[in-house]
Amino acid sequence: MTEAEFRALHERLRRASAWVPADRRGALNNISMSDVVAAAGAVSVGRTVSLAAPIQGQAADNPDPAVHQLAYSADGPDRVSGLTFATDRLALNIHGDADSHMDALCHVLFDGTLYNGVADDTADAAAAAELSIDVASHGIAGRGLLLDIPRVRGVPWLEPGDHVTADDLRAAESAQSDRIGQGDLLFIRVGHRARRRSLGPWDAAGARAGLHPAALELLAERRIGVLGSDGNNDTAPSIVEGVDFPVHVLAINAMGLHLLDYLDFEDLVAICDDLRCCSFLCVLAPLRLPAGTGSPVNPIAIF
């Protein structure tokens, strides 16, 4: 895809996804209260499953791993009475290539602006505050839908560099007898975690499977609420001349679509197979970070 073709696609998606100039919620506006009620009403057996991966240690795809410090208050003031506490401290790179996280709408700048034309004022965190992850501070709930692309293609996973196309998405809809609908929390499996477990970690920053940028037109047409993947959503290397992370640019900057990267769908797939159902109530609860560009996240699917 040439840079000119990409810019034309960006403009089409921006226009197709436009809300009022003051909007800061983006595609979350596509999720109605009735959508949440309907998704909750579809819960039938009460089974829950996490869509997040355990926080990772240092590896080929995680050169800047989380630092988790665990301590005990052995010398605390209450020690003489036999009372001690275990405490934790956690520091992590939210936007790395290993840990499950959610991107805020202030995460991607393109041509000097953020989503909906918000100016690049991130030096004083004003723009980040407007479009921060705190937009979702009260949580996100709705119908989750898993589309398993490797299964449709008959492979265990997509190889790094491969793309999920709009035709792949339609084929998955047909195979699973379920359709992407307005307000859906859409999760697209490329098999990243299955490959990692089978072959070991690799430099995912340089090579990974993801969505083809042109597939975003279908998702804009269906007016989904949230998009997540077990990879980065973007393929590496980029196929767009002069633009890295084109899916992030299109989804976050043009469409106002919150992205969830590096989720883990392997347990979810097992439950979907067991219950013969690929849709579910899904609840997202990012941390309350008033100027955060993203958050660690542990999505929960409820059947």
Image: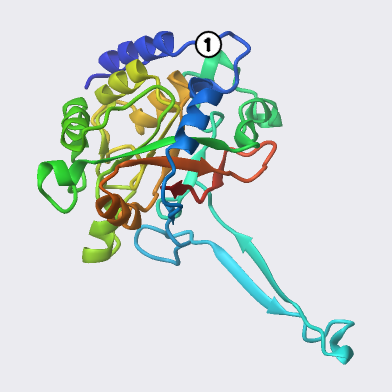
Which quadrant is home to the N terminus?
A: top left
**Can residue 55 be seen in the rendering of this structure?**
yes
Using residue 100 as the reference point, say whether residue 82 is left or right of it. right
Residue 88 quadrant: bottom right
Q: Position of residue 112 (x, y in %)?
A: 52, 19
Q: Is residue 129 above or below residue 111?
A: below
Q: Secondary structure at mark 1?
A: loop
* Residue 135 position in % (x across, y down): 62, 30
Pointer 1: what residue?
A: 19
Q: Nearer the viewer, residue 128 or 85?
A: 85
Q: Nearer the viewer, residue 300 or 22?
A: 300
Q: Residue at x 52, y 31 (%)?
A: 37
Picture quarter containing residue 183? top left
Which residue appears at 25% of the width and 58% of the height?
194
Amino acid found under the numbered disc labelled 1: Trp
Give me the residue at 23% from left, 19% from top: 2
Residue 19, compared with residue 269, is above or below; it is above
From this view, report whether residue 224 is shown above or below residue 13. Answer: below
- Viewer-proximal residue, 81 or 46? 46
Q: Position of residue 205 (x, y in %)?
A: 34, 48
Q: Is residue 4 left or right of residue 65?
A: left
Q: Which residue is drawn at the image coordinates 29% and 44% (left, top)? A: 277
Circle 1 residues within 10 Å: few <14, some 14–19, many ≥20 = some
Q: Position of residue 79 (x, y in %)?
A: 85, 87
Report the front residue among 19 and 182.
182
